[in-house]
Structures are given as C-alpha cells and as structure tokens.
Amino acid sequence: MRSVTYSMSVSLDGYIVGPDGTFGWTAPDEETFRFWTDEIRQVGVHLLGRRLYETMLYWETADQDPSLDDSQREWTALWKALPKVVFSTTLSTVQGRARLASGGLTEEIERLRAEPGRDEIAIGGARLAAQVAASGLIDEYRAMVYPVLVGGGIPFFPQHERRVDLELAETRTFGSRVVYLRYLVAR
C-alpha cells in the first residue's frame, strides 16, 4: 500500500511561514536543493491545498526562465511531470498535471492508496496536512528544520488534541546547518 508523507521546511520554533506570511528563510542551498529533488523522485502524486498550489505554480513555467541552472531545470521537469491533486473550494481550474479533487480528502487518499504502485502520496501545506493528520492518515512526517526562530505564523504540526507516537527513521545535517528529520508514525 502507498504511504502518505508530510514533508515541508519548518523553522526551529515550528512554523512553515512567519507571521508576515513569508518563508524566504527556507531558500535551499545547493545541497538541500539536491535533497528535495531526490525526495520528489519518490512521489507518485502530490496533494496540495490552494495556497501551496498557487505558490508552486512558478515551477509549471520555470523551464522558460533562461537563468535557471541545471539542478533547477531538473526539479522543474520532475515537478511538471508529477500528478497533483488540488483541494480548493475557490479554484475552478488548475494547470499542468494537476486536477481538482473530486471528493473528500479521506476518500481521495483511500482511493490513491488502493492504486497500484509503491510511490508515495505526498501532502503539501500545513492546513491540508492538519486535516489528513486528524483522520490518522499520515504515515511519515518529514521536517527540514531551519536554524531560525520566526516567532509565529502557520505551524508545521496540526493543532488538534491528539497524541501521535513517532519513531525516528532518519536524520541528516546539511552544511547549511539545516537538519532533516524523518519520523514514522508508530502504529
């Protein structure tokens, strides 16, 4: 069965964006960018909320930017080819390999899990991840922890009263002092 993963950059105090709504502190260096590229290769479908979908729209046409380096072109090709499901009540159309979700979040994940293949179902966006976590459907939490305290914003972890026991599966420290943490949900 396909696993559901939630992976994002996060400040040390637990936020994916700061109180001003920005996340410029997450700009990856070459080493972390290669890591993200390797991670996206293992994804079979990416589920996004509207905000993250709109943020990631840049990569749908980024290959037209002559200033991109080879690693950014590689990322763009992988992202554009990746099937995406967008959960939104305000969008009526989406671009590229994206489609609007036709059912509820739980039903969509159950349908995708039942499809053949070993590739991951990736969740993008803290608000969407909070809904998936509340249903107990996340199998792995992956945090790229940046050495910065932003003091508020949108939290990485869902804010609901539910205990989730985790097992540390992997850590990695990058030259930029960013730390990758991968946890499996203990079942």
Image: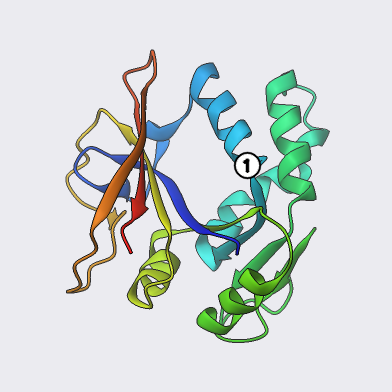
Above or below: residue 74 compared with residue 57: above
**Left or right: residue 59 compared with residue 131:** right
Does residue 88 appear to the left or right of 155 in the view shown?
right
Image coordinates of residue 90 in percent, x first then y, are 58, 80
Q: Quadrant of the C terminus?
A: bottom left
Quadrant assignment, res 89: bottom right
Please state which of residues 77 and 113 is positioned toward the viewer in this rendering.
113
Residue type highlighted by circle 1: Ile
Up the image or down, 124 lies above or below 146; here it is below
Q: Nearer the viewer, residue 146 or 184?
A: 184
Residue 21 visible in the snapshot: yes
* Residue hosting label 1: 40
Rendered residue at 55%/34% (across/down): 36
Asked if residue 134 lies left or right of residue 32, the reply is left
- SS for callout 1: helix
Work out whether residue 17 can be spotted.
no
What percent of the width, then of the height, locates residue 65? 77, 30
